Amino acid sequence: GIPLLIPGERFNAPIMRYLKFARDFNLRFPGFVTDVHGLVTETDASGNKRYFVDCVRNPD
């Protein structure tokens, strides 16, 4: 897959746009899902897919 963030990088608008694209693509083309390293997909009790990214909070 494509690395989402390299250590030391921060989320920004282009990354958020890409994540939204990946979500929309996966919904529109089932079976041809994107593979983004670091992007976790879980299905909730209602059957909806939710997307998460593991990250570490800055203590500032």
Image: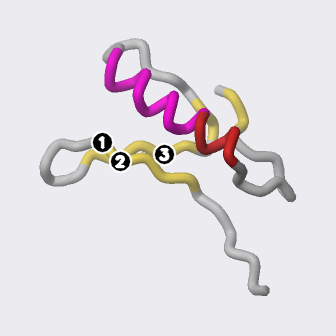
Type of residue at label 2?
Answer: Arg
Q: Which residues are magenta?
A: 18-28
Q: Which residue is mark 1?
A: 49
Q: Nearer the viewer, mark 3 or mark 2?
A: 2
**Pointer 3 or 2: first along the chain:** 3
Q: Quadrant of residue 27?
A: top left
In the rendered image, which quarter contains the C terminus?
bottom right
The image position of residue 47, as x and y in percent, is 17, 43
Neighbor class of circle 2 (other Cα within 10 Å; few <14, some 14-19, many 20+) is few
Type of residue at label 1?
Answer: Lys
**Image point (65%, 26%), residue name:** 1
Q: Which residue is mark 3?
A: 40
CA gap between label 3 and label 2 equals: 8 Å
The image position of residue 57, as x and y in percent, is 68, 74
Report whether 21 appears left or right of 11: left
Q: Is residue 26 one of those drawn in magenta?
A: yes
**Image point (56%, 53%), residue name:** 53
Q: Which residue is mark 2?
A: 50
